[in-house]
Image (cartoon, helix red, strand yellow):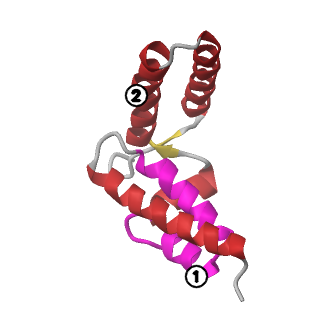
Amino acid sequence: MIEKSKILYLCAGFLLVGLATLGVVLPLLPTTPLLLLAAWCFANSSEKHHRWLVEHRVFGPIIQEWQENRRIPKKAKIIAIASILVFGTYAVGFAVENIIIRVIGGVFCLIGLLFVARIPVRQDPKRAP
């Protein structure tokens, strides 16, 4: 019988792949982080599904680049930074009234920005010499 945690990881992996698929066409839904989380969930639940995702013709190269070189596509980095700035500014500046929650939210946004800013960008293979 499959462990409950593996079932949860498997369900989360499929949910994340679904959201990542939507992110391909919706500009503010970050495809790359969702795929990386899905790969992690599948790695903890099903070797078969993890292999399927890593070998997928569309999603596989993004995950492989991260696993091998810890790099993400430039578009993913731009979207991640823009999302943090737009939604973080809205949440911290307008949606929350409590000053303590604003400060904590601002700190988390800053940490997120610094983390994403430090991730190297994958070079576009079409433009490589």
40 magenta-colored = yes
At horizontal 42% and vertical 45% (from top left) the residue drawn is 30
Residue 42: x, y in percent?
60, 69
**Residue 65 visible within the image:** no
Q: What residue is disc 2 on?
A: 82
The one of 17 and 73 positioned closer to us in this rendering: 17
Look at the numbered disc 1 and give the secondary structure of its residue.
Answer: helix
Amino acid type indicated by mark 1: Lys
In percent of the image, x 62 and y 67: which residue is there? 9
Residue drawn at 59 percent across, 22 percent down: 105
125 w.r.t. 84: above or below: below
User: Could you say which quadrant of the image residue 10 lies in?
Assistant: bottom right
Measured from the top left, where is residue 2 in percent x and y? 70, 84
Q: Main secondary structure of the magenta part?
A: helix
Badge number at residue 1: none
Closer-to-camera residue (16/60): 16
Q: Amino acid at mark 2?
A: Ala
Task: State the SS at label 2.
Answer: helix
Residue of label 1: 48
- Badge 1 crowding class, 10 Å Cα cut-off, few under 14, some 14 to 19, many 20 or more, is few
User: In the image, 16: left or right of 39?
Assistant: left
Q: Which of marks 1 and 2 precedes in the sequence?
A: 1
* Residue that extends furthest to the front in the rendered view of this protein: 97
The answer to whether any part of residue 89 appears in the image is yes
Residue stretch rendered in magenta on the structure: 30-59
Q: Which is nearer the eye, 122 or 56?
A: 56
Q: Among all residues in the image, which is located at the extreme bottom?
A: 1
